């Protein structure tokens, strides 16, 4: 259930959008949050802030297609 909430946050909040495609890393971070939780507030807010802070160091994954015009131009050069 928490994973569905995280996926919703990734779609909704720009600060978390770079987590898209990092499924293994999200799972590892969530397990770490469960083990290290010592905060007196809401656990959900703790997870949100943890993902938000950790997202600052992530590079967004960008998918490229071989059908893009950049690659077609490169084929014409060779």
Image (tube, rainbow, N blue to C red):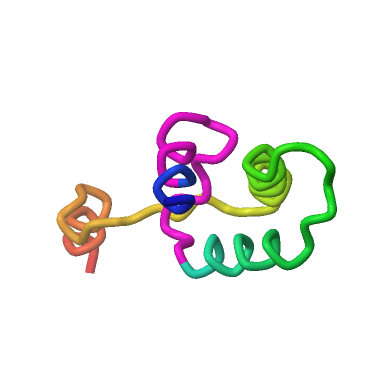
**Image coordinates for residue 74, horizontal then vertical, percent:** 25, 60
Residue 18 inside the magenta-drawn segment:
yes
Vertically, is 60 above or below 33?
above
Residue drawn at x 45%, y 55% is 61
Side of 31 where 60 appears, left or right? left
**Image coordinates for residue 8, horizontal then vertical, percent:** 41, 38
Where, quadrant-wise, is the C terminus in this rendering? Answer: bottom left
Residue drawn at x 55%, y 40% is 16
**Span of residues in magenta:** 7-23
What secondary structure characterizes most of the magenta part? helix
Residue drawn at x 20%, y 50% is 68
Vertically, is 28 above or below 45?
below
- Of residue 42 and residue 13, the one placed in the foreground of this image is 42
Side of 23 where 16 appears, left or right? right
Side of 8 where 37 appears, left or right? right
**Image coordinates for residue 6, horizontal then vertical, percent:** 48, 46
Residue drawn at x 48%, y 50% is 2
User: Number of labelled discs?
Assistant: 0
- Of residue 40 and residue 69, the one placed in the foreground of this image is 40
Residue 11 inside the magenta-drawn segment:
yes
Vertically, is 68 above or below 35?
above
Vertically, is 64 above or below 18?
below
- Of residue 23 and residue 33, the one placed in the foreground of this image is 33
Side of 23 where 73 appears, left or right? left
**Image coordinates for residue 69, horizontal then vertical, percent:** 20, 47
């Amino acid at each position: 259930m928490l994973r569905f909430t995280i996926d919703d946050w990734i779609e909704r909040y720009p600060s978390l959008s770079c987590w898209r495609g990092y499924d293994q890393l999200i799972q590892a971070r969530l397990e770490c949050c469960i083990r290290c939780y010592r905060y007196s507030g809401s656990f959900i807010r703790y997870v949100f802030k943890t993902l938000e802070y950790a997202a600052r160091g992530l590079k967004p994954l960008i998918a490229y297609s071989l059908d893009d015009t950049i690659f077609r131009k490169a084929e014409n050069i060779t």
